[in-house]
Amino acid sequence: MEPELEKVNREADENGKSPSTGNFIQSIISEDLRTGKNGGRVHTRFPPEPNGYLHIGHAKSICLNFGLAAANGGITNLRFDDTNPSKEEVEYVESIKTDVRWLGFDWEERMFFASDYFEQLYNFAVQLIKAGKAYVCDLSAQEIKDYRGTLIQPGKESPYRNRSAEENLDLFERMRRGEFEDGSRVLRAKIDMASPNLNMRDPVLYRILRATHHRTGDKWCIYPMYDYAHPLSDALESITHSICTLEFADHRPLYDWAIDNVDYDVAAHGRPQQIEFARLNLSHTVMSKRKLRQLVEEGYVRGWDDPRMPTISGLRRRGYTPAAIRDFCERIGVAKRDSMVDIALLEHCIREELNLKAPRIMAVLQPLKLIIDNYPEGQVEWLEAENNPEDQQAGSRKIPFSREIYIEQEDFMENPPKKFFRLVPGGEIRLKSAYIIKCEQVVKNEKREIVELRCSYDPDSKSGGTTAGRKVKGTSHWVSAPHALPAEVRLYDYLFLDENPEEDEEVNFIRKINPRSLEILGNCMLEPTLAGAAEGSRYQFMRQGYFCVDPDSTAEKLVFNRIVSLKDSWARMQKK
């Protein structure tokens, strides 16, 4: 490591914060720019594997790679690590492109695939074989694992390690031509079977795999391994700073070995440097693509974009905004050690944004009909209601008031406890932006269930409480029954009951799924302002939370997802 860079890393504390910049990666880049390294260039890349949908952890990486480049006058590539055709699909490629763009980033014309370099990577492997630095090995996958050794015991050399360059070249070419069965041979780097780093004990560079590739079809039946293709793809694209997560720290020597031992033009392309940061671990969810795929394929969720999923498409469908996710990624920072981030912070970020921007709407999720006997039949008043008290420019809207309205079932109690300030028999409440009403009669069915309330209203109490000498503590939202829009509302809770469902690997994470992570209310009533609300529109339902129009909505019935409730546990924790 260069002396100056070593100094910069020492100055960064264990959480990755630098006194001068607040980001240890930025400190490295700043030092590189100061010394003229890479000719003053900053060139990063976001390299997803197209084997699933991106999640919130990838959003952190996207923001980091694109953000650091932009902040330092640089550029960023989008490069798909498509070296495993058995798990990769065009659907995933398209979803990744959509997610990156939705987050607000643009790779311009710089979209690449590892498969763009398959011929060059093959030629690099031939170079390694000719130099005596790679060999074809006939051991099975299990034998390679057994020969590898342990953290305290050195590995054992393969009996095929000392084949001649000529024999290895012949075998490697025949591997490419498809003469051998899948898994029967691999190409391995010849490094050091006694290395304290297991990744340097003759790692596999190529394997035989007959699977149709989404771009190259059946042209290839051998595919490079990630640890070989990734550093060389970085080098070919002239990447300067290869930013990855901490689990790749032990792979860095192999990253450097691959670049150092092939013949490519360093003067023209520069030499990329791998830098590791802590991945995002979010409470009450899982971040493993394999586990997310299992949730989808086994039907525990409705798809990759299920609003309970931590995928970017799931968050988008739930109603999260790109700005809120970028804000979240900025707040959690860039650390050098793994930690768990409370999902309450993510919720806090979207609440802060929507509190300022989301129109206020009255929506009754569990309706109870209320008839105002002394209000004229057939009369409709259009009352004024403010759209957002936090936004002085938001203005107001007109809402209809009539003899029959809906209130929330929970806003009435026949036998209330102390300090219940909603409607009770003989009691009064104010209807938001309307009148004071009094409950005169409770109507029940043959099962003794409450089906209707008969009330009276004070015509002099119209919005503002001007009736002299009376104070009413309770205020309820409501919807005019003849004008109400029917809706389905989906209330989402955390997908997992445990804060860290991956903590105990001996307990199947599926067993930790929250059985009440989704509650569907199918008979909700909304004010008519929402007629024709566009997909993705966001609103605050008064006293209920923030909601978003779901793509399942139809002309006959709107469908809303609850983004978050109004209760902000993160803000409360910060005040303690």
Image: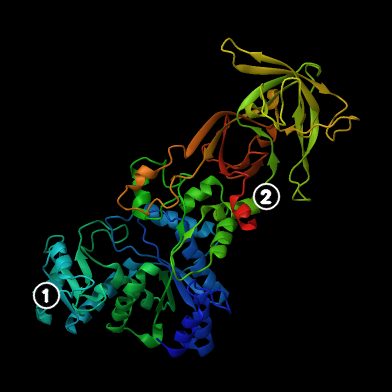
Q: Residues within 10 Å of mark 2 (few under 14, many from 20)?
A: some
Q: Say if 390 sits above or below 179 in the image.
A: above
Could you tell me residue 198's position as x and y percent?
Answer: 24, 73
Q: Is residue 2 visible?
A: yes
Side (left or right) of 184 relative to 380:
left
Q: Quadrant of the rendered structure where residue 511 is?
A: top left
Q: Quadrant of the N terminus?
A: bottom left
Could you tell me residue 55's position as x and y percent?
Answer: 45, 55
Which one is nearer the viewer's eye here, 222 or 568?
568
Could you tell me residue 529's position as x and y percent?
Answer: 70, 35
Residue at disc 1, secondary structure: helix
Name the residue tied to disc 2: 355
**Amino acid at dot 2:** Asn
Name the residue tied to disc 1: 170
Most extreme residue toward the front is: 418
Q: Residue at x 49, y 63 (%)?
A: 60
Q: Say if 512 sits above or below 114 in the image.
A: above
Most extreme residue toward the right is: 468
Which one is nearer the viewer's eye here, 367 or 224?
367
Side (left or right) of 96 relative to 405:
left
CA gap between label 2 and label 1 equals 67 Å
Colour theme? rainbow
